[in-house]
Image (spheres, rainbow, N blue to C red):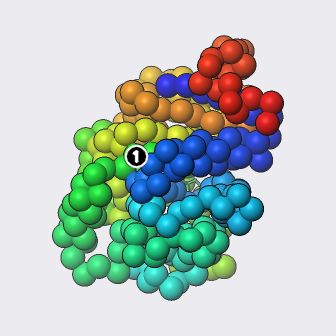
Amino acid sequence: MQVVLRPTADEASSLVARMIAKALRAKPDLVLGLATGTTMERLYGILGRMHREEGLDFSLVRTFNLDEYIGLAADDAHSYHYYMYNHLFRHINIDRRNTFLPDGMAKDLKSEARSYEEKILRCGGIDIQILGLGTVGHIGFNEPLSSFYSRTRDKSLTPTTVAQNSRMFEEPSLMPRRALTMGIGTILESKALILLATGKSKAEILAKAIEGPVTSMISATAIQLHHDCRVIVDEEAATSLQAREYYRWIYENEPEWEEYRGK
Ligand code: GLP
């Protein structure tokens, strides 16, 4: 794992956007795993701008989102289908037929989960999975005790997650208590992972997730097991990290980051 600290949330998000852009230029039909949440809005804003101003081409890209609420239709303003359309898809030249999210309205959730996994496989697997970090330490909606071998499935949300996310709903009681989410096993099969975390509210859980012991109580610790994982954070999110100086040194000196430095 490599951890990169950037001074602000804008700079952290812009670094992730440039990493995605580089991968996209190398492989125009990239299979990109996407996340939702307020952290990602900044990233998607930058990708939209790169499309408009630099002609970043998404025409062949395939995308798979981590999760969706059970019981919300795609046109519900609180659904992740809607979120993705609103924050990213309508701002880029992606073919909507190549964008996939689990169907939270499916009658048979088990078979929807199975078919979602099959679609990922048919596309050749996910090249880069973007991850956020929930306050409970989840990635996707993999709540505490999610098995590291888990696959896409329906999952009940913890009170902490409900408290975190219900602020997006005008009426908090309308927030679904269950979701369909990729499993930890599904996420770990992605060829590369990029976790983006910004802001003070993430500092403690981020330190546990990347420097703490691996435990299914904090599903984000599973990323420590991935062989190709980068964690990009801003200074505020980094305040509780023990090895901050080391991470700074890596970014300033490792050849991998040279092309991004000073921009
Ligand atoms: C939701 C999503 C997660 C995401 C998290 C972070 O819970 N299911 O995938 O990482 O939100 O949200 P935010 O960026 O708003 O802190």
Element under disc 1: loop
Image side of residue 204 versus residue 113, left or right? right
- The residue located at (68%, 15%) in the rendering is 253
Please, is residue 177 above or below residue 2 in the view?
A: below
Of 170 and 152, nearer the camera is 152
Name the image quarter holding residue 242. top right
State left or right for residue 163 relative to residue 138.
Answer: right
Mark 1: few/some/many CA within 10 Å (<14, 14-19, 20+): many
Q: Could one spot residue 236 in this view of the protein?
A: no
Q: Amino acid at mark 1?
A: Asp
Residue 226, quarter of the rendered image: top left
80 vs 98, nearest the viewer: 98
Quadrant that contains the C terminus: top right
- Expressed as whole percent of the image width and height from the top left, the position of residue 186 reads 31, 48
Q: Position of residue 72 (x, y in %)?
A: 45, 80
Q: Is residue 259 visible?
A: yes
Pick whichever, 8 or 236, lies toward us.
8
Q: Is mark 1 within 8 Å of ligand 1?
A: no
In the picture provided, is 181 more to the left or to the right than 56? left
Instruction: Give the residue drawn at x 43%, y 38%.
Output: 192
Image position, residue 225 (x, y; %): 37, 28
The quarter of the picture showing ligand 1: bottom right
Q: Is residue 141 above or below residue 191?
A: below
The total of numbered circles placed on residues is 1
Query: Quick check: 8 above or below 30?
Result: above
Q: What residue is disc 1 on?
A: 127
Q: Position of residue 14 (x, y in %)?
A: 71, 46
The residue that appears at 46% across and 39% down in the rendered structure is 193
Residue in the image at 53% along x and 63% along y: 58
